[in-house]
Amino acid sequence: MRSSRNNARSPRVDAGEAAGRLRDHLRARGLRMTGEREALVRAALGRRRHFTLEELVEEAVGHDARASRATVYRGLPILIEAGILQPVLVSDEPRRFELALGRRHHDHLLCRACGRVVEFRSSAIEDLQLKVAARHGFRLTSHVHELVGDCAACRGAGRKPKPARARRRA
């Protein structure tokens, strides 16, 4: 199992590549690329860590004054479908997202006390998921896998789990 402390630094992704992917996805759905959607892509590419929907709204509005909260709320599912973003840390509140484009698949560990996030890859877990899915007649297209617990530092300090909203953002 390979592990890395929240190095949630996304690789540099070419904005033209991301915009092209979104444009192709929109075209296939009979939609068009707008300035607001381009601002949303630039905002997503500007995030270098796991981020909340609200943080993406702030970034998008900073790129284009015409972008709004509604632009982001409507555009987020499209960016996920296009493979540009992916949801992560779905058991945390608020949910967080990360750049998917240009990154290898990985999973997450989340500390309940401090909110620390560790990204890891495990071929054994991936293989097991495929076997379980096949056993039940499923063909996997995606998944979100996170393990929630208490990190060694918090256990050693006797820290108790905080309510999800009170966790430090990783």
Image (cartoon, rainbow, N blue to C red):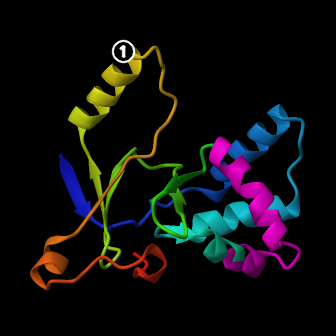
Q: Residue at x 83, y 67 (%)?
A: 70
Stretch in magenta: 58-81
- Percent position of residue 107, x then y: 35, 50
Image height of 59 relative to 131, above or below? below
In the drawing, does residue 97 fall left or right of residue 111?
right
In the drawing, does residue 133 fall left or right of residue 65?
left
Tag 1 residue: 135
Q: Report if residue 84 lies within the magenta region.
A: no
Taking depth in this image into account, of 99 and 107 the one nearest to the observer is 107
Image height of 121 relative to 114, above or below? above
Q: Residue at x 39, y 45 (%)?
A: 104
Taking depth in this image into account, of 33 and 142 the one nearest to the observer is 142
Q: In which quadrant of the rendered view does residue 39 lie? A: bottom right
Image height of 36 relative to 159, above or below? above
Q: Amino acid at mark 1?
A: Arg
Q: Report if residue 78 lies within the magenta region.
A: yes
